[in-house]
Amino acid sequence: MRGLLACATLARRAAAASSTGGASTAARRHLAGAAEAAEAELKKTALYDFHVAHGGKMVPFAGWSMPIQYKDTIMDSTLNCRAHGSLFDVSHMCGLSLQGSQAIPFLESLVVADVAALKDGTGSLTVFTNDKGGAIDDSVVTKVNDHHVYLVVNAGCRDKDLAHIGAHMEAFQKKGGDVKWHVHDERSLLALQGPLAAPTLQLLTKEDLSKMYFSDFKMIDINGSACFLTRTGYTGEDGFEISVPSENAVDLAKALLEKSEGKVRLTGLGARDSLRLEAGLCLYGNDMEQHITPVEAGLSWAIGKRRKAEGGFLGAEVILKQLKEGPKIRRVGIFSQGPPPRSHSEIVSGTGENIGEVTSGGFSPCLKKNIAMGYVKNGLHKAGTEFKVVVRGKQYDAVVTKMPFVPTKYYKAP
């Protein structure tokens, strides 16, 4: 992230120097060259050239050069995902496997999920916690079998997550624990989302996808490649995340777009953010952070029943106490008037008292109105509670609403 900020800062300095004439030609060249060097340091996915060839507008994100949008507007891309489908490159995210006879007990010491209770080939959202119960990261964890767990962590959290897992693994192994890991840097990750996701993907595999439900996982052949397939996503729509060997990623992307006859479109991070916000899903770094617990974030459902009884994960004492007594703050959904609220917009009572803060917000392409998420004091979190949000120094009416804002369409077992 520091690299991204440095890149942007250098670019602004170069532009300022050029516009004011306040720096010498040599200085301007130095600043411009430094900005280009910072840009060159960004990582590129296996589909980078494919994105550029298709009009992708590349921006720095979590140390990677990623497409924020293509030729469509972010609004059009969002609507197309809901109506037809989207293909996202999410290869910047980090997939890893934990293996060994004690892989599950080891992972359960770090996350709130009851991984042992999952059926083989199924998964769940979970949270890595610190010793104060705060969220280090959220992740989708899949129990492949009793000796193999597959999970995907956020790109921006990769370094700290791997350091955290690695340090605890080393201590676990020194005590004789049987667990090892593999980070799947040899693979790329594509997310196929929307109503046409399943019928399009079905054309590229012999596996009967109608028998694969939300959060199910399989290792199957897709378009001639050995893939990890999870029926999940970050949009609220039915869809899949496909881990594919990087050398086959471009061919798979091309095949998926061709089989949809143009209805599934390449989609960037801009629409992905509006889609996840409409679905009421947290973005780590905005809606979840080191000081926010899963209970405060409204993710108590992700804490396994056995884990609520036994604990056994970092910060369990804090989290179990919150489950019993209630947290001091809670994440809520918000409808508001005026300009869309953004992260860090203040939430105040009718008398002007600070009662919370917006963590994500924007204009919903589907609902054609402002939506946001944020944290308010416990007791002010019920649907229908009215307050104000402060945008650019002015107060605007707002009301708590249930989430998701747009109904989800996950493909679940009957």
Image: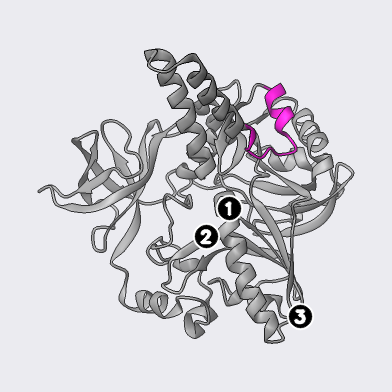
Q: Residues within 10 Å of mark 2 (few under 14, many from 20)?
A: many
Residue indicated by mark 3: 101
Q: Residues within 10 Å of mark 3 (few under 14, many from 20)?
A: some
Residue 86 point in image, percent of width and height: 64, 35
Q: Is residue 47 magenta?
A: yes
Residue indicated by mark 2: 137
Q: Is residue 228 magenta?
A: no
State the residue at coordinates (43%, 58%).
Answer: 289
Residue indicated by mark 1: 154
State the residue at coordinates (35%, 74%).
Answer: 322
State the residue at coordinates (52%, 39%).
Answer: 4
User: Bounds of the magenta span?
Assistant: 40-54
Residue 247 point in image, percent of width and height: 84, 41
Task: Give the quadrant of residue 377.
Answer: bottom left
Q: CA–CA distance between discs 3 and 2?
A: 25 Å
Residue 364 point in image, percent of width and height: 42, 34
Task: Give the quadrant of residue 183.
Answer: bottom right
Do the residues bearing badges 2 and 1 touch, measured as CB atoms within 8 Å? yes
Q: Is residue 114 visible?
A: yes
